Image: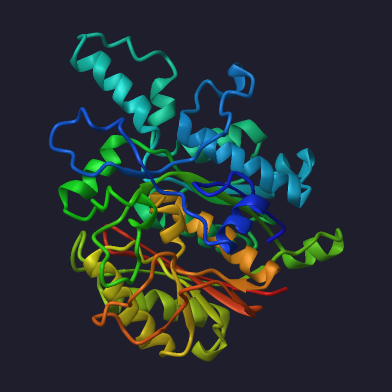
């Protein structure tokens, strides 16, 4: 891994976001924009602020909605840090794996309004579909950067970003590509909040937004929907060494599994299977893992099941935290953003805390939960993400 970039609710560049993470900063606020929607109780969001997404020439980004532009912002950072030149991008040996829950929800809404309210099949504009198509991030980024290698859209809800990084790793490991751009993105929209609100899985702690997202805590009442993007540049180890690249971290393992049981109810067995597959891929024992960045979104059931799966695979001594207390749940972006956070932990020598974790729910497994940031240099980091559909992913990163 030779380049990373992000846009997040706690910072829109890697340096500021990692500093905010280490300072235990909050990215959750209450919004009044959704008050007019009937039946929507949740009014909490974690949004990207103070970021100009109109700065590119319109001709180059007219097919990009907010989600793809967030992805572009993160990708430009990663490519610049990795110092990937145009010749490499266009060589055919460089590909892209990028995902989101779906395309631009705002673009989808504008088209739906034109069709259904105005009976106008042309009102959405000629490029609007290209903004909300499922593979809008992967396709638009490939065109923008002139990438001619493989394009892998990973539209797997909350596992989209981590799945993209995992598939990029596998493409390089198989010899199919030398360099891969990989990540995930999501834009905030009221329909995203409504999905979880309708499942009684969204936090209603409106009086104290900064304390609303509480992974593993006994007082948690649901997740906070967020937005953002994360991107990494992966390349063959020997190639990176030969060109004198600054290697930030090494991806050494990836595992993915499906519960095969229920669309929304998580399975500890399925989660554990993904973790074991990642360890097998890396040829590492469970004892090698020195920190786990958990998916934990602050839902009542999900955090408990994940803790049990983690305990079953790694035991109770490994330090564990969830950064969603800081950023909310950024859906398709979370796996990529959290991978960048893991790289920050490796590089800066600290373990992020689970913000707002005051008292661990006794239903959770007995793990070493991190409540305040710790100074440490993790040698091997596991980043786990899970999604509707029983989709489980686990990534292993190692200090270079």
Q: In this view, does 291 lie above or below 287?
A: above
Q: In this view, does 175 lie above or below 208?
A: below
Q: Please, which residue is most extreme toward the left here?
A: 39
Tell me if residue 174 can be seen.
no
Where residue 239 sits, quadrant-wise, is: bottom right
Q: Residue 193 location in percent, x, y?
A: 27, 43
Q: Nearer the viewer, residue 159 or 153?
A: 159
Q: Residue 29 location in percent, x, y?
A: 39, 44
Q: Residue 326 location in percent, x, y?
A: 46, 57
**Quarter of the picture holding the N terminus:** bottom right
Residue name at image x 18 percent, y 42 percent: 41
Q: Which colour scheme is used?
A: rainbow
Residue name at image x 25 percent, y 8 percent: 120
**Quarter of the picture holding the C terminus:** bottom right
Q: Residue 111 location in percent, x, y?
A: 31, 20
Q: Which of 104 and 202 is in front in this view?
A: 202
221 on left or right of 164 = left
331 on left or right of 74 = left
Residue name at image x 53 percent, y 49 percent: 10
Q: How many labels does the image show?
A: 0
Where residue 378 sits, quadrant-wise, is: bottom right
Tell me if residue 54 can be seen.
yes
């Amino acid at each position: 891994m030779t380049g990373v970039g992000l846009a997040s609710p706690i910072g829109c560049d890697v340096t500021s976001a990692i500093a905010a993470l280490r300072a235990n900063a909050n990215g959750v606020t209450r919004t009044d924009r959704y008050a007019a929607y009937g039946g929507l109780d949740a009014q909490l969001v974690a949004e990207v602020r103070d970021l100009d997404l109109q700065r590119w020439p319109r001709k180059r980004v007219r097919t990009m909605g907010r989600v793809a532009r967030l992805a572009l912002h993160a990708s430009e950072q990663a490519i610049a840090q990795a110092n990937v030149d145009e010749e490499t991008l266009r060589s055919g040996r460089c590909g892209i794996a990028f995902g989101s829950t779906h395309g631009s929800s705002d673009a989808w809404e504008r088209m739906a309004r034109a069709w259904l309210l105005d009976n106008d099949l042309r009102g959405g504009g000629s490029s609007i579909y290209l903004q909300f198509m499922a593979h809008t991030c992967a396709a638009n980024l490939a065109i923008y950067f002139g990438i001619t290698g493989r394009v892998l859209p990973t539209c797997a809800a909350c596992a989209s970003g981590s799945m993209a990084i995992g598939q990029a790793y596998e493409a390089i490991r198989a010899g199919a590509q030398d360099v891969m751009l990989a990540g995930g993105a999501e834009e905030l929209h009221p329909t995203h909040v409504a999905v979880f609100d309708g499942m009684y899985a969204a936090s209603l702690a409106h009086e104290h937004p900064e304390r609303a997202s509480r992974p593993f805590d006994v007082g948690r009442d649901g997740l906070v929907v967020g937005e953002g993007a994360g991107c990494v540049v992966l390349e063959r180890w020997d190639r990176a060494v030969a060109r004198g690249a600054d290697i930030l971290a090494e991806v050494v393992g990836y595992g993915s599994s499906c519960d095969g049981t229920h669309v929304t109810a998580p399975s500890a067995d399925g989660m554990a299977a993904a973790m074991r597959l990642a360890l097998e891929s890396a040829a590492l024992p469970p004892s090698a893992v020195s920190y786990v960045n958990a998916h934990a979104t602050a839902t009542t059931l999900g955090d408990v099941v994940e803790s049990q799966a983690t305990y079953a695979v790694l035991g109770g001594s490994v330090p564990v935290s969830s950064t969603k207390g800081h950023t909310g749940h950024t859906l398709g972006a979370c796996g990529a953003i959290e991978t960048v956070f893991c790289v920050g932990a490796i590089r800066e020598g600290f373990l992020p805390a689970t913000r707002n974790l005051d008292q661990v729910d006794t239903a959770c497994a007995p793990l070493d939960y991190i409540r305040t940031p710790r100074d440490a240099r993790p040698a091997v980091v596991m980043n786990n993400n899970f999604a509707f559909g029983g989709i489980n992913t686990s990534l292993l990163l190692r200090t270079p």
